Each structure stands twice: as C-alpha cells, then as structure tokens.
Image: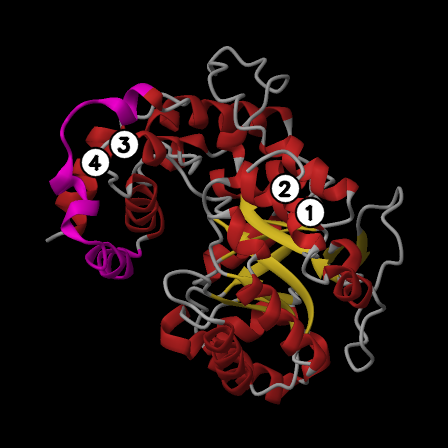
Amino acid sequence: MPEGATIRSCGRRRFVKNLAAGAAAVVAGIPQYVLKSSGEDYHVKKGEMYFRRLGRTGFLISEISLGGSPLPDWSLFRQIIERGVNYIDTSHTYNNGNSERQIGRLFKEIGRDKVYVCTKFHAEGRYTEKSIIESVEGSLHRLGTDVIDVLSIHGAENEADLTDDRVLGAFEKLKAAGKYKFRGLSCHTNHQRVIKTAVECGYYDMVQMGYNVFDIQEGETNVKTYEDYLGQSGIKDLIAFAKAKDVGVIAMKTLRVGGRRQDLERYRTGKTSISEAMLKWALENKNLTAVVTEMLNYDQMREDLAAVGIPLSAAERRSLFLCVAEHAKDYCHMCGTCQKTCPSRIRTTDILRYLAYAEGYGKTASAKAMHAQLAPEQTALACRDCGACKKNCPYGVDVRKRIADAHRILST
C-alpha cells in the first residue's frame, strides 16, 4: 500500500463522525473505574488488582484479563472475576458460541456493570456487510446483552480489510443502533502493516496483538546466554506508536514458548514460575494496557494473578532470557515472511500457529480441526523443499521442519 493510502482510504468512508462518537465518555450503566487521561500514573490499584486505561475508550481494565478460548469451569470463572479481573476477550467462534453463552450467564448472576466484554467477528472469505451484522446480532443474543463494550475484527491479517466498505458499513450501522461502544481488532500476523493501518486511519480504538518475551528488542539483550537475533520485530515500537495515538493495546500469546512446553520447571526462580516471569516482563511495558491469558485451573489463576504489581527481579530476568535463548529457534513470530515468500503458497504462518496451539497450549483437538480446514495444496503436502521459508525467516526458524512436524501431529 502506498504511503498515506490508508489515511486517504479511511477519509473516503466517513470515519471522522464515528471516531468522534468512539472517543465519547463511557456509556452510563457501565460505571466502572475510568481514568480520564494517560498521564504519569499508568496504572491504579483497587483491591489486589492493578488497572490500566484502554486508550481513548476510557475503560480501566485489569492488567491480567481473561481469554475466552476456552473459559474455565464455572466455579473458577467466578473466582477469577472475584479476584478483580474485569475484562474478558471472546469471539463468536470460541467453543461453538458457548464462551459467549457462559459470559451471558455471568452477566445475569453478577450484573452487567461488573465486567467489560470484547467479542469479535470474522472479515474473511465471502463476507458481506449483512453477514457481519448477523454475526454480531448472534453474539449479542448469546451474551444476553444489548451492547458490546468492544467489537473487534477477529484475526485481521490484511490491512485492506480494515477500511473495506463492508466492514466500515457494518460498524456504522451497528454503532447507529447502539450495539457496541468501541471498535478494535485482533491480529495474529502481518502486525506491522495491520496495526499501523489501524492506528493511522483513526477508526479503531484498541488493538490486540501477540507480544511476549520472544519479541525482546535491542537494548534488552545484555545477557550472555542470549543472542541478538530477535531484535528485528519492532513490536515495542508499534505498541508505542499506538499509545501515542491513544489507541489501547492488549497483549495476547504472552505465554507462548518455542516448541513443546517441556523442562520449563528448570527456569523457575524461587517461587516464580516461567509463566509468571513472562507476564511480569510484558507488564513492564507501560504502553501496554493488559495481557489476555487463559486460566483453566487454579494453579494457572494463581500464577497469572501473582504477576500483578510485582516487578521482574534480576534473577527472574536471567532465567527468562535463558529460556528464550534455548527455545527461540522453534518460536514463530507470526511475521508472515515465510508465507509471503513460499512459491507453493503454503499457509505456513497459519500452520505454525496451529502447531503452537497444540504444543504450547494443549489445544490439540481444535488445532487439528483448524488444520483440517486447509486445502491439501495449502499444507506441507505441497512443499517443494526449496528452503525459501527457512532462508527468508528473519529469526532463523526451520520452517520446513516445523510445518512437517505440524503435518505429523495435526493430520493424524
């Protein structure tokens, strides 16, 4: 896309009116903690939880927030909310809509004004303005609410979709009908173009993107066990750019590791697990609003919430960077370079993401289901073994081997 094309494209689509509406005060009826500006106090404490302002939405959300793919069982779900978590990320596809239904049950039991919800629609394939609106109407029904706090595009990977008339038209009509308050998107790949476009055009109030310790930047690598081959992602600069435009940034995939989650116990520092250290590292970034993470058992809840308000120690940082150094060559940054340079047009980035779901999160069944939706010519079956993916990967990942691993694990 030519320089400035994004801004001009948005300018043709009446986004200014909606931007003004989106920046308005929080709608009455959700009287949660609201921080008026993004000054020196980047977070505030209430109870045992710290909260940060989600950009120009004004929402003050918990630094550790809850991912809904999947949600925990009901008892644990209630405990997590009682511990101060007040933001839940979900989607119409999560657990076949049951994630939204469970949040709807929560609203009925504790009241709509206790929790913010972000849900998402897909803008891919043969979508239309009508299909988007129907998807959102379905989400509202399952959530049992009249209004969604943050309505987002799910997994945006093409920057042109952000300013497509079908997407903007659906957003406008849903906004006019009072169906949502603020707009956002999640992004798994092509971050630089997608997030930059979202921020520049001014139409989006928040973005959700992958961010974790494997995105270490130059200047943070003064550790003998860590090589400076990961300072190319530019993710921190992207987050700072969004912050400067008052666009809220929520991190996801913060607890991902390279390859399988094995032997991680040896990276423990005292009582601090590697997961806690990863979350602490992410929350050091004051330009970040929150980290969305799944908490599926008591130990995960305890570990994740223990990261709130406690700085990363020098010893924890050393263990964390050692973990990165020893696992980085198996970690895909979802930059999309391999997929763009593959002569066979294999969906390498998607395949490696599905592999991460299986290896890193134990979501083997859902990973297999997503992998099965790919056409054979989009999988490792079409690999010419030319090596272009590995050669062009800026992080040195052996993409050929990893997509072969994925085919072995996910095709059986």
Quadrant location of residue 281?
top right
Crowding around mark 2 (Cα neighbors within 10 Å: few <14, some 14 to 19, many 20+) is few
Q: Is residue 243 above or below residue 268?
A: below
Q: Which mark is residue 173?
A: none
Does residue 273 appear in the picture of this structure?
A: no
Q: CA distance from mark 1 to mark 2?
A: 5 Å
Magenta span = 363-391
Q: Is residue 289 rendered to the left or right of residue 117?
A: right
- What is the crowding at mark 1: few (fewer than 14 residues within 10 Å), some, or many (at least 20)? few
Mark 4 or mark 2, earlier in chain: 2
The disc, 4 or 1, on the residue closer to the chain's N-terminal end is: 1
Residue 300 lies, in percent from the top left, at: 47, 55
Q: Amino acid at mark 1?
A: Arg
Q: Check disc 1 and report its element: helix, strand or loop.
A: helix
Label 3 – label 1 distance at C-alpha: 31 Å
What amino acid type is highlighted by mark number 2?
Ala
Callout 3 crowding tier (Cα within 10 Å): few <14, some 14–19, many ≥20: some
Residue at numbered disc 3: 342
Q: In the displayed structure, does residue 39 sit left or right of residue 6?
A: right
Of badges 3 and 2, nearer the viewer stands 2
Q: Residue at x 48, y 81 (%)?
A: 134
Please name the residue that numbered disc 1 is placed on.
Answer: 8
Where residue 5 is drawn, which disc sits there?
Answer: 2
Residue ID for mark 4: 344
**Kind of residue at disc 3:** Cys
